[in-house]
Amino acid sequence: SRKIAVLTSGGDAPGMNAAIRSVTRSAIAKGWTVMGVNQGYAGLVAGDYRELAARDVGGLLSKGGTFLGSARCPEFQKEDVREKALRNLNRSGIGALVVIGGNGSQTGGAALNDMGFPTLGVASTIDNDLVGSEITIGVDTALNIALEAIDRLRVTAASHQRGFLIEVMGRKCGYLALMAGIAGGAELVLVPEIDFEPDQIAEAIHDAYRRGKAHAMVVVAEGAKHNAEQLVRYFHDKNTGFELRATILGHVQRGGTPTAYDRLLASRLGAGAVEALDKGISGVVVGMNQGVVSTTPYSEVTGRTKGISPELYQLAHVLSR
Ligand code: F6P
């Protein structure tokens, strides 16, 4: 029988708990033992883990966050720190590690795997910037939270003929902003992938005013060239037609109750990780591609960021008439 460990790392994402539950129960179904690592790589280095039984992962599906805890662990980039983690893993008789997380977390996993310890990843980040999965665990929930906020802001914006610059998360990736913009009917979407000058944006807001819009909703990705507050300050003495306000959604987007989509995705990817290990596969990220659970080698995942679709960016523009 096998013994594996599972951890969550980096920014928490709604659905991580469902993924831990799925890894745990899928592995137990094969007669394996599962160790849950506390606080991500920090717990791996400290040897802070405990066995997870099927009952230990009950009641988790509907909970956001991660009950194992997560952390950003820059020290894990050091080889001697990783060696300490490996000594702990070997001493405990653990034969493989499942890392549930985003870009930084998968880079850590790849480094461990390169040192000869079978490691694989489960694609989980609200940013959807991870190569290897068309959609990652947590995106759908974060998007729905952003959308609800945009809907609410539009109500007050229309009452006052105001423009709102709404800043959403996503690190260097414009996915959340673009999707929230399309689904929320934004007049403009500003993403890191596409360059813009503030004056162009002021002109575009003014144009929306001239087209008779009761409000201007501008979704700004946090990684965009200028942030929401900077832009509102800059627009202060420009004629945009609207009185402007900035709202930064921030970590509100991370703490939600996982949607059905995220629970299902996490359940499938977690099970996919165990299936891969059972086939002797490691050194990959388990993701969802074209509706199928599939694996992508770490070498194609790490050091990259997924871009946004130009067609969808164009769609956001067309539909904002
Ligand atoms: O990667 C998830 C994310 O929420 C990003 O969207 C954001 O840039 C970052 O984490 C915030 O990090 P922290 O939680 O460390 O402030």
Image: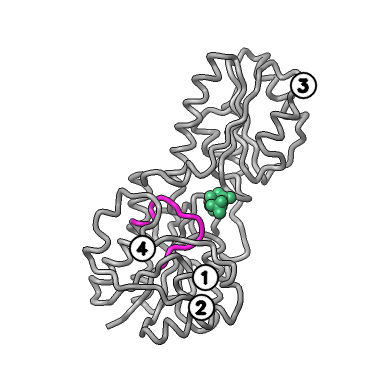
Circles 1, 3 touching at the beta carbon (< 8 Å): no
- Which residue is the site of mark 1? 297
Residue 85 in view here: yes
Circle 2 residues within 10 Å: few <14, some 14–19, many ≥20? some
User: Dominant secondary structure of the magenta stretch?
Assistant: loop
Q: Nearer the viewer, mark 3 or mark 2?
A: 3
Q: Nearer the viewer, mark 3 or mark 4?
A: 3
First in residue order: circle 2 vs circle 1 = 2
Q: Which residues are magenta?
A: 7-17
Measure the alpha-carbon separation of dots 1 and 3.
50 Å
Q: Amino acid at mark 2?
A: Asn
Does the closest atom of ligand 1 sit within 8 Å of the Cβ of label 1? Answer: no
Does label 4 or label 1 sit earlier along the sequence? 4
In the rendered image, residue 28, in percent from the top left (x then y), is placed at 25, 71
Q: Is residue 194 left or right of residue 298?
A: right
Q: How many residues crowd mark 3 within 10 Å: few (<14), some (14–19), many (20+)?
A: few
What's under tag 1, amino acid-wise?
Pro
Asked whether the beta carbons under mark 3 and mark 4 sit within 8 Å of each other, the answer is no
According to the image, label 4 marks what residue? 270
Q: To which residue does mark 2 refer?
A: 113
Sequence-earlier tag: 4 or 2:
2
